[in-house]
Amino acid sequence: MNILHISNTDLTGGRFNGYYMNQSRDKSFNVEMVVWNKESHSSNVHRSPPDNPALRFFALNIARIGARLGFDGLTGFSGWILPSRDYFKRADVIHLHQIHNHPNFSILSLPMLMRKKPLVWTIHDPWAMTGGCEHSFECDHWLTGCKTRCPHPRLKSLFRNYTPYLHWKIKKLVYQHANLTLIVASKWMKDRIERSPLLRHLPCHQIPFGIDLEVFKPRSKIECRKKLGITLGHKVIAFRDTDIGKNSKMSSYKGISYLMEALKIYDPKESTTLLIFENGKGFRILSSKYRVLTPGWIDGEDLVVALSAADIFLMPSIQESFGLMAVEAMACGTPVIVFDGTSLPDVIKAPLGGLAVPAKDSIALAEAIKKLMENDELRTRLGKQARQITEREYSFPLYVQRHLSLYDEVIERHHRL
């Protein structure tokens, strides 16, 4: 079986976009990718458009103009030229991923592509069912056509508050006769698909993301803390920061302000280190109460060490379609604390792999932190259960096998048409 994945990048998001399917020991299939931004040196990953500076410059500026006018996701032309490429001709199935972040892909090309090849699309966030926003927060206009002024436009276009209505109508036309199979990673996303006037008529399958459980596994907390320079005897709270100082949309998605407030409320009984991935600068104001350690953006073995060093992992997102880092923490035997209202409570199987508290409630979040940090027996039990959940639900071989079974199904259905 030949599989062609289409996304914005290959290495960034490789655990989401199919890139790491090449690492499977199952040799019954071959994976190729088409991306705008190629980061790897793999010969199986192709740029679209190819390495023609003039063509890429033209494509990028067309995309920028489209985004400026509020037509992002509609103006790219790479989808139209895919059928002429050998890698497309070789493919038995086409698997779409983050195409709305692809500067040169338009959903208008989907009907043409569907006629030529079986198509599946992993819906990574709600963009496909909205008038253009990736997260709608409290807004439910996506259920009725985005006819009113958009409160959460995705980009700063000239007509950003009003083009969502046009986006929604165009998506309806594209999807209404689509021979398209959807994939989502969480029950939360599946529920939204089933409510969506745009997508609910399409077959939708829930396939959680998988991770390498031979890499992400519990390590000695003492040894991991030594590697990170954490004082022995300290308790450790880990989380990801997204630059609270800039008050970015990502910070609002991830609930950073509520996390900050909860850590101000929580009064640790023992010396405690905050282990903060990515930025962390905004949390240095808490240095009188905690030791603040900011290793920056980490991945791979360094991430395993950090997650294993932690006593708990905090992920209080208020918009989250899956939450892979929560699964990675659980695989390392670290319980997770999340907010209700997103995919995360179901992903961590709360209260088995961690705790869920009411969304945007910093007091409840502080109480949950206190509950786990001051109860070693409960924290240990939840950590063991968290690991068991990942072994049962989130192994990478299971992720691959679920996809292969679905590919077989959609290929057979396409041949019958």
Image: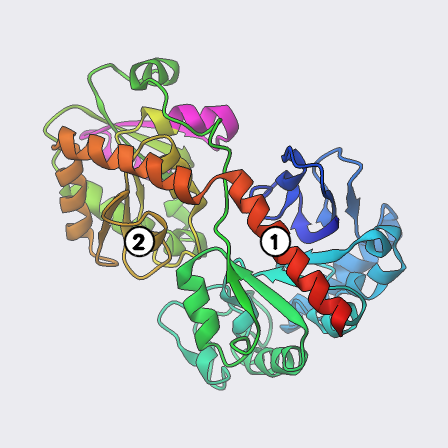
Q: Nearer the viewer, residue 276 or 345?
A: 345
State which quarter of the image contains the C terminus: bottom right
Residue 346 location (% of width, % of height): 33, 54
Residue 4 location (% of width, % of height): 74, 51
Report the number of discs: 2
Cα separation, mark 1 vs mark 2, equals: 27 Å
Image position of 43 with respect to 306: above or below: below
Amino acid type at image mark 2: Pro
Residue 405 is marked as 1
Front position among marks 1 and 2: 1
User: Is 197 on the left-hand or right-hand side of 218?
Assistant: right
Image position of 370 with respect to 363: above or below: above
Image position of 223 with respect to 251: above or below: above
Q: Which residues are magenta?
A: 281-306
The residue that disc 2 covers is 345
Amino acid type at image mark 1: Ser
Disc 1 crowd, CA 10 A, few/some/many (<14, 14-19, 20+):
few
Residue under the image location 17 percent in, 23 percent down = 271
Q: Is residue 348 visible?
A: yes
**Which numbered disc flags the more N-terminal residue, 1 or 2?**
2
Q: Nearer the viewer, residue 195 or 37?
A: 195
Residue under the image location 61 percent in, 57 percent down = 406
Residue 295 part of the magenta-drawn span: yes
Q: Is residue 109 visible?
A: no
Location of residue 123 by image quarter: bottom right
